[in-house]
Amino acid sequence: MRLLIVDDERPARERLRRMLAHEPGVTSVTEAADGVEALALVARDAPDALLLDIEMPELSGIDVAASLVVPAPLVVFVTAYDDYALRAFDAEAVDYLLKPFDGARLRRTLDRLQSRLTAAARAPASTCTPPRQLLVTERGATRIVQVADIEWLETADNYVALHTRDGAPLLRQSLGTLLGQLGPAFVRCHRCAAVRLTAVNRIVPHSKGDCTLVLHSGAVVPCSRQYRAALLDPLRPA
């Protein structure tokens, strides 16, 4: 089992690493000192599970969990505070480790993780849940964009503009990759654009098969002929 410890306090990371060193089911342990580093390591190393502190500067553990991209690692929250339990449940955490804990309690958590991983390996492939939010780096700070607030997407060089009612922050990613993560709620309508289906208010046809999409917010999005059918099919009544 490959684990990633995420905690902004070095002593806490070192203590947990020492405890994990005695567990035979753990094959590797890496560390992250904050949420941004954690998400980068998840993308690079694809750990099986995160042992995730909750109260951290800039990005909380709850924010990190909500920003994981499928296929996502399992999450165990490790915290000194017991008032986050309900939010941890909402984040579908496997366990909630309350500091301080002993080796026996940690072992029960590892057993739960291993059981979940074994069950997932045996289960047939299923549809994964898209992330609830995306993280955008702006001028050295990290902005949290709720996926539910995004109306449409537009390519901008090596970035994708996430159009919301409050602006269009730029995410460094390809449009195709992002659409694969967001699932069927978004449909490509142009080589350079995609739209949230529920945001579409009107479709204005043009003479050559292209059309314009008018969103509930009043935003106007192009739709080219080659993508028009794929857009119209899910909008038709069942």
Image: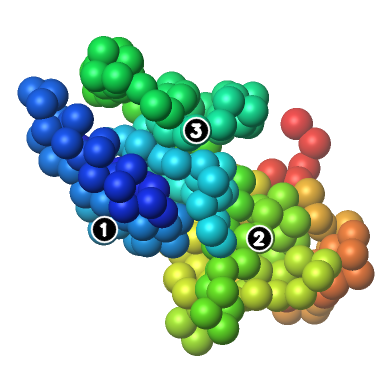
Of the residues under marks 2 and 1, which one precedes in the sequence? 1
- Between marks 2 and 3 in the image, the one whose residue lies nearer the viewer: 3
User: Looking at this view, is 217 or 5 the one in front?
Assistant: 5
Marks 3/1 in contact by CB < 8 Å: the verdict is: no
Label 3 and label 1: CA atoms lie apart by 29 Å
List the single residue furthest toward the bottom: 157
Label 2 and label 1: CA atoms lie apart by 22 Å
Q: Amino acid at mark 2?
A: Val
- Residue 234 screen position, x and y as percent: 69, 44
Q: In terms of secondary structure, where does tag 1 sit?
A: helix
In the rendered image, which residue does mark 1 sit on? 44
Q: Residue at x 13, y 40 (%)?
A: 28
Q: Which image quadrant for residue 39?
A: bottom left
Q: Which quadrant does the N terminus fall into?
A: top left
Q: Amino acid at mark 3?
A: Ala
Q: Amino acid at mark 1?
A: Arg
Determine which of the numbered discs, if any, sits on residue 80 in the image.
3
Q: Residue at x 76, y 66 (%)?
A: 164
